[in-house]
Image (cartoon, helix red, strand yellow):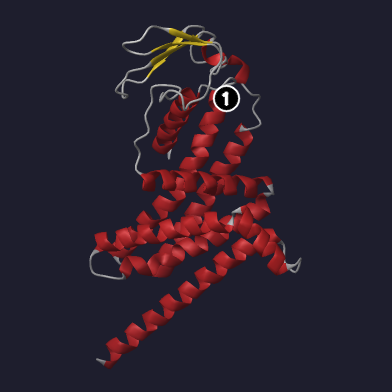
């Protein structure tokens, strides 16, 4: 998780530098945001690795599920509580320094024309007066920024060639982290109920890691299943689905309990399927 937090923090800082904000956020705020993202990443990556290891070693399924689920619940709760306490630390935003001062030169070497822009007021006013230097043309002064459609130049020399599926995964992890944060703000009982229901659903995928004789293939299938659960969590927590749940329940059940209830129902049905398959295989072995 520490490595994931560090990488995510660097990505956030690069995004911050690319957008040239007028009021940069404090470093501690970025670290907390990166840690929450890494917590969701660890939740959706460490559990399948643990279940895959238990299945490969032939451990008892019930004990493996209880061990992985309990450890994940304790770890997630402790880290979330620590991050909530860190957010109460006085902001150090006043000490954050903007990126560059007056006369900041912004260029993108990835472009063919290698256009450069000199921000006369620096990053404090990224859309203010500027001098544009286009190769083969004289310098031109712009009193204000006419729009990004005039010249194909991003605000700073950082490209974004990340594949779409990795972008989508990063966005869903960020939304999952925001869901956990919202549940934490609603109280520890609500948070434990949500994370407990989510862990029931995640650990119910234990049967996938025993579906074939190839552990690596089972691991890939398990990771695909966890990716689907992540997408399902984000979909259920979207504002549109919240409105659908509210209109369907009509105050018969709090909307905050709808998603945990669905997760528990799907997880318990999956557990029931695994148990029935286990006894069916056991009966066939006795019959042979």
Looking at the picture, tell me which residue is in the foreground, 106 or 132.
132
Image quarter of residue 276: bottom left
Q: Is residue 198 above or below residue 132?
A: below
Q: Residue furthest right?
A: 251
Looking at the picture, tell me which residue is in the foreground, 25 or 213.
25
Q: Secondary structure at mark 1?
A: loop
Q: From the image, which quarter does the C terminus lie in?
A: bottom left
- The residue sitting at 43% across, 40% down in the picture is 1
Please provide percent x and percent y for residue 240.
62, 56
- The residue sitting at 26% across, 70% down in the picture is 212
How many numbered circles are shown? 1
Q: Is residue 241 left or right of residue 232?
A: right
Residue pointed to by mark 1: 25
Looking at the picture, tell me which residue is in the foreground, 199 or 240.
240
Please provide percent x and percent y for residue 89.
64, 27
Q: Is residue 166 above or below residue 256?
A: above
Q: Is residue 259 above or below residue 127?
A: below
- The residue sitting at 66% across, 24% down in the picture is 90
Please provide percent x and percent y for residue 22.
58, 19
Q: Residue 246, can we see it?
A: yes
């Amino acid at each position: 998780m520490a490595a994931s937090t560090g990488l995510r923090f660097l990505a956030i800082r690069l995004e911050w530098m690319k957008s040239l904000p007028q009021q940069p956020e404090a470093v501690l705020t970025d670290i907390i945001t990166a840690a929450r993202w890494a917590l969701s990443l660890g939740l959706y990556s460490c559990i399948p690795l643990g279940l895959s290891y238990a299945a490969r070693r032939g451990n008892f399924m019930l004990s493996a599920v209880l061990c992985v689920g309990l450890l994940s619940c304790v770890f997630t709760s402790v880290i979330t509580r620590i991050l909530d306490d860190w957010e109460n630390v006085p902001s150090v935003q006043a000490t954050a320094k903007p990126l560059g001062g007056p006369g900041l030169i912004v260029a993108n070497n990835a472009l063919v024309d290698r256009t450069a822009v000199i921000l006369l007021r620096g990053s404090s006013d990224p859309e203010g007066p500027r001098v544009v230097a286009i190769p083969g043309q004289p310098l031109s002064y712009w009193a204000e920024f006419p729009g990004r459609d005039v010249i194909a130049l991003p605000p700073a020399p950082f490209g974004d060639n990340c594949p779409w599926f990795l972008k989508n995964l990063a966005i869903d992890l960020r939304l999952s982290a925001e869901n956990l944060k919202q549940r934490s703000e609603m109280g520890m009982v609500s948070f434990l109920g949500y994370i407990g229901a989510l862990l029931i659903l995640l650990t119910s995928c234990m049967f996938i890691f025993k579906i074939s004789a190839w552990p690596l293939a089972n691991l890939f299938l398990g990771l695909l299943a966890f990716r689907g659960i992540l997408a399902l969590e984000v979909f259920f927590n979207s504002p549109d689905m919240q409105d659908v749940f509210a209109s369907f329940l009509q105050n018969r059940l709090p909307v905050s309990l709808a998603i945990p209830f669905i997760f528990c129902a799907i997880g318990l049905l999956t557990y029931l399927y695994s148990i029935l398959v286990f006894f069916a295989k056991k009966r066939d072995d006795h019959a042979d």
